[in-house]
């Protein structure tokens, strides 16, 4: 299973068609010191802001780390656990191989190649944590990513 397939299945499971759910993939996290090129910033594979209609209370942040192989799971890349709730997203077979290595408090969504619904399923619930980055900085990071996606889509449409 590819990363793009995992992204699609995750989106279908947690955000598609839901009002007040704002999701973006490959979101660069804010940094505190110095000037760092955008490509040097840590990224969250997927970031979701869950709000509750117009009664905005700051919302719930969920961070997702996508892993497609055992080597990917064991890589030294930083795990971006910044949200109230944090998850791994992986093929179900990989989950069976690494489930004993998943830290307490981290949730897991799994996906199968042959599922009929085309979505990932939560097989391990996370525990709520304190945000590691202030809410307003996460909002800004999400807005930056969504703006880049919009600009990219405009360019693609203009080329057609």
Image (tube, grey):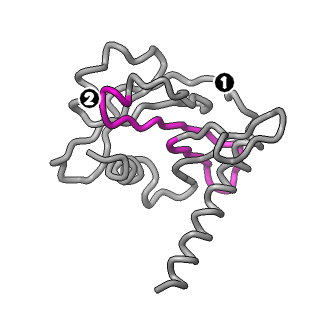
Quarter-wise, where is residue 155 in the image? bottom right
Q: How far across and down, in percent of the image, does residue 25 sit?
A: 52, 50
Rendered view: 111 above or below 132: below
Q: How far across and down, in percent of the image, does residue 147 sit?
A: 65, 63
Rendered view: 149 above or below 14: below
Q: 150 and 83: which one is in front?
A: 150
Residue 130 numbered mark, or none:
1
**SS label for mark 2:** helix
Q: How far across and down, in percent of the image, does residue 89 sit?
A: 38, 36
Question: Which segment did they paint magenta?
Answer: 45-72
Residue 73 numbered mark, or none:
none
Q: 53 and 109: which one is in front?
A: 109
The mark that comes first in sequence, 2 or 1, is: 2
Q: How far across and down, in percent of the image, does residue 66 sit?
A: 41, 38
Q: Nearer the viewer, mark 2 or mark 1?
A: 2
**SS label for mark 1:** loop
Rendered view: 47 above or below 102: below
Residue 94 numbered mark, or none:
2
How packed mark 2 is, by other alpha carbons closer than 10 Å (few <14, some 14-19, many 20 or more), is: some
| Residue farthest left in this picture | 114
| Residue farthest right in this picture | 34
Query: Does the CB distance between marks 2 and 1 fall below 8 Å?
Result: no
Quadrant placement of the N terminus:
top left
Residue that appears at 69% across and 48% down: 38
């Amino acid at each position: 299973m590819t990363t793009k397939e995992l992204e699609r299945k995750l989106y279908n499971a947690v955000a598609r068609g839901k009002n007040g759910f704002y999701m973006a993939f490959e979101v660069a996290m804010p940094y505190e010191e110095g000037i760092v090129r955008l490509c040097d910033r840590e990224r969250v594979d997927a970031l979701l802001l869950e709000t509750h209609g117009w009664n905005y209370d700051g919302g719930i942040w969920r961070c997702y780390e996508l892993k497609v192989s055992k080597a990917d799971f064991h890589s030294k890349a930083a795990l971006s656990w910044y949200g109230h709730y944090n998850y791994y997203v992986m093929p179900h077979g990989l989950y069976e191989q690494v489930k004993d290595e998943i830290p307490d408090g981290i949730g897991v969504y799994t996906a199968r190649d042959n599922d009929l619904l085309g979505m990932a399923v939560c097989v391990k619930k996370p525990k709520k944590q304190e945000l590691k980055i202030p809410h307003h900085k996460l909002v800004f990071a999400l807005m930056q990513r969504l703006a880049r996606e919009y600009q990219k889509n405009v360019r693609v449409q203009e080329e057609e």
